[in-house]
Each structure stands twice: as structure tokens, then as C-alpha cells.
Image (cartoon, helix red, strand yellow):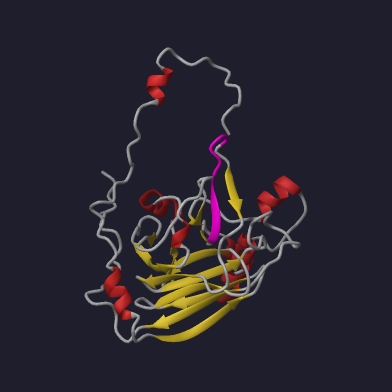
Amino acid sequence: MKLIAPEHSPPFDAAQKKAVRPVICYPVDDLKPADLATYRAARECWMRVQTILVPPREARCFDVPAGYFFRIISTDGPQVGDLNLWNADEHAERFFSGKTRALHGTHLSTGDRLWSNMPYIRAMATITEDTLDWYGFDEFGGSVHDVIGTRCDPYTHHLLSGGQYHHCCHSNLTRAFAAKTGRSLHEAEGFIHDVLNVFMCTGFTRDTGQYFMKQTPARPGDFIEFFAEINLLGALSACPGGDCGEEHSSDTSACYPLTVEIYRPAAPPVHWQLSPPNGYDRTHGG
């Protein structure tokens, strides 16, 4: 956090420096937008092929073939979830929340894509519907579906509160990924990465710049829907903070399950092609 009382006096041109207008780091005007009309047309004759129930304070993995859709649904009560995604055929390729944030902003919604890490940097999934898009940004600067939080984890919990808590989202995702892939917990942990915080309402305080959370506006039946641009392995944790209106990493918060539904369209969207790996030649000027 910035100091409440700075130790150095402002220079003579401090006001001028602060008045400099910001520049968007990554303009996306030339980034081909998602063709939502063709995605939605492909849903017309789709078939639900699998339903996965994610219990409170636990995580579950699921497979989504390229060209399929999946939804994450608020089931019985207000509940946030932490989502990890991997290339199902190569787990070294995983969701890159930082680059997704740089391209689409702090909070995601319909038409935004979830991008993978370097050297792949390609679209893994596209958000095709979001029933919480009405929320926008509130008076505190809060919004839903963030890519600014990392995931609750037992290391930070121990640092701040002590104790050994095993149902943070990091641990939940680790257990689920280990069970799915046959890796040891120690090996699996290295594959767990920063998340899309589904349904979570977050932002940064304007005075101190601290990451905050508030009660999710999600109700039973709300969902966020994705189209798989490549073969995906997903893992979703039902956060131990429940609606995250008070605290997370807790055994006292009211928690509810989340549901993942996977849909196979009768045919892929018109003109859709598998998302290709990034075209950079990786010579790095050498």
C-alpha cells in the first residue's frame, strides 16, 4: 500500500505529472471480436452431455472437448467459484489470468476470451453468456467475474492467521487435479494457477488500493457460459468463503454447491476453427 504520510515532498510540477492522461497498454481494436451470433446459433440444437456437481469447500475436474460449451451455474445459494483451465492434451498450457486481464480488463463478461500462457498465448475459451452482466461496476468500483484475485490459499492463510487450513481453493484445486491426472499432490500443486473468480464481486479500494470483496449478487440459476476453443481440462472450486461477503478460508461461512454443465452442439459454429498456437517464432532476437 502507498504511505498515508509520504516521506518525500512533492516536486513543483506534481499536479502536472498527476494530470497526465493514461494510455491503454494493449488496445484490442485489431483483435478479432468473438462472433457471438454464430456461437449462439450453434446452441439451438445442442445436447447436455454431462453434469458435474461441485460440493461446498471442494473442487472437481471436468473435460470439455473443443467446440463444446460449458456453463457454471449457481445452484442452491450465493456461492463463488475459482476456475482453472488447462489444455487437456498438454497441461503445461494453462489459463493466463494476467494476460487476460491486460487484454480485457479486471472483470470479464460476454465476448471476452480466456487466454493461455506463453509461449502459446491463444484463446482457450470464449464467454458466450453471462446472466450477471447487468451488474457492471458499482459505486465502490466492484464488479463480478474477476481476474485480479489469485485464489485463496493455505500459505497466505497461515501467514495472516496461522493454523493449517486444507480447504482453501488452492488446496481444493490441487486435490482435484491430482485425482484427475494421477499426479502426486506435490507434483499437482505446481500446475495450479491464478483463477477466474466466477461470481465473485471484487475491486480495489480507491483510498488504499487494496483488493476487496463483497457479497456476490449471484442467485440460484445465474450462470456464466463458455465455448471451448481447444480441448480443455477444467477444475472448479466452490470457495470456502461462500458468497465472500464476510471472509474466505472459513468453515463457518454458509457455502453451497456449484454445477458445471457440458453441452455438445449438433454442429460447430459456422466458420469456427480450432484456436491455433501463437504465431511468434520464439527466436527472441537471438
Q: Is residue 1 toward the left or the right of residue 118 in the image?
A: right
Q: Residue 161, position in %: x, y?
A: 75, 48
Start and end of the magenta stretch?
199-208
Q: Is residue 277 left or right of residue 165?
A: left
| Quadrant placement of the N terminus | top right
Residue 217: x and y, percent?
Answer: 56, 61
Q: Residue at x 70, y 51 (%)?
A: 157
Residue shown at the point (25%, 59%) measured from the top left: 32
Quadrant housing residue 40: bottom left
Residue at horizontal 37%, vertical 20%?
16
Going by the picture, which residue comes out furthest to the top?
A: 12
x, y percent for residue 61: 54, 74
> In front: 117, or 146?
146
Q: Nearer the viewer, residue 214 or 107?
A: 214
Residue at the outermost right position:
163
Does 27 sit above or below residue 260?
above
Q: Position of residue 183 (x, y in %)?
A: 58, 70
Question: Which quarter of the rendered picture does the C terminus lie within?
Answer: top left
- Within the magenta stretch, is there residue 202? yes
